[in-house]
Image: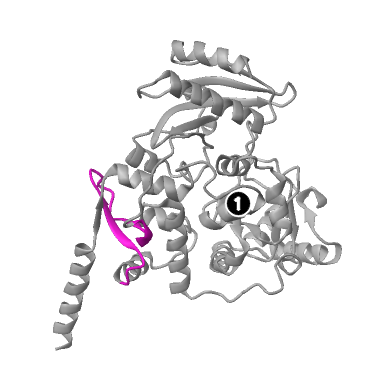
Amino acid sequence: MDFALKIIKNLYTFNFYFMDRITLTPEQARKIILHAAGLWKRAPFGKGKEAVYKFIDHLGFLQIDSNYVVERAHHHVIATRVPGYQPEWIDSLQGDGKVYEFWTFATGYMPMHAYRFSLPVHAAFDGKYDVTPAEATLQRKILDRIGREGPLMARDFENDRTTKSTGWWDWRPSKRALEHLHLSGKLITLRKKDFQKVYDLPENVLPADLDLTPPTDDAFTHHAIHRALKALGVASLKDIAYTCRFVKMPWKTAIQQLVDTGKVCAVDVTGLKGGPYYMLPEYRKKSITLSGDVFILSPFDILNVLRHRLRDFFEFDYQVECFVPAAKRKYGYFSLPILIGDTFVARMDSKADRRKRTLLVNNLHFESVKRTKAMITDIGEAIQEFAKFNQCEAIVLQKCNDRDALKILRQQLSEQ
């Protein structure tokens, strides 16, 4: 009898799952993805510092990157959604205790109210690495010193390296200890205006009334799935789990629970084989109209981080080539995708020459899309706005794969 009931229950779950499964066209999926990313129109979160917080709260995570060829990625990503953005606003939000910095699949800013959901990540990091007795002693000394002296930077500790560095991630012992303490939750970090990382004790930074109750596995997985779908719009379980890739959780069971209770929708996308995909129920009947504005995007924008999604949903093959040997680069060192509506129309390799206050556009490469004079002019206006954001007063366009567009843009950009 129990066996028969189990079969009936499994059949019910199977039928519920597939009967309630939604089919989207690629165009519908793109609209949902762009709406979730905050790229369906200009200023979707409003203006000012509060809009910055709304955006970070919506995404749940804003990636930080140190590359300074143009303005750093986290500032760039915000400025794309918040017109008139000032970089000091993010520092102010950190100082107000509204956002904090931590690592999920990368380092980034997260809303402070969700801090307790980073506790399983802290625990995962703490158990991931074996700490030698010498390292444990060094960590205790660091915690003691910060407790006595207050927040400190890595350069405040002596250079205790005994061997030659082999690369970016080959940190000296004190820096490695600081990072381990940060990742395991024993230290928290802030950023100075010059992008230097400052380490402090959590009790000196976290609001006194903050909920620090460790979430259950169910609460953590449900939170992570909801957060990922708010930011990604339409996503596979693999992509959802990647946003918390250092924590091993029963993701398949968790997503099925949410589908069964109607809190998440299972989705097929016509022509795509990578499913099933998932989305939040609010998108079932939501009408989304794309504004057609031009967006010059950071390589580390939430839309661009998972490159396979660009290929699958947007038919855009993209790679940030700063990690590619110079001889193998096709488009440039730091090529920025340019989006209009739901189409990637170009990519722009650029650099801000801060001494000369000039934005150098090394290469503007148009994709195989129909181009009009109006589109080219709109792109020119977006480049002018991007230059202003980078505190550049002049623009030099050096190369473009469309001669007519090159002529139009050079004239337009010289008149700014």
| Residue indicated by mark 1 | 51
Q: Check the image and report above or below for 239 versus 43.
A: below
- 47 and 359: which is toward the camera: 47
Span shown in magenta? 261-283
Q: Report the front residue among 390 and 81.
A: 81
Horizontal placement of 304 versus 193: left or right?
A: left
Q: Please, what secondary structure does the residue beneath circle 1 have? A: helix
13 or 54: which is nearer to us?
Answer: 54
Q: Position of residue 13 (x, y in %)?
A: 22, 72
- Please determine whether, in this image, residue 369 is positioned above or below residue 235: above
**How far across and down, in percent of the image, does residue 160 sit?**
77, 50
* Residue 166, horizontal then vertical, whole percent: 64, 40
In the rendered image, residue 215 lying in the magenta stretch gets the answer no
List x then y, in percent, for residue 366. Answer: 43, 22
The quadrant of the image that shows the N terminus is bottom left
- Locate residue 130: give its quadrant: bottom right
Which residue is painted at 51% across and 53% down in the image? 105
| 142 sits left or right of 6 in the view | right
* Foreground residue among 348 and 381: 381
Give the residue at the far bottom of this rendering.
1
Q: Is residue 192 left or right of residue 128?
A: right
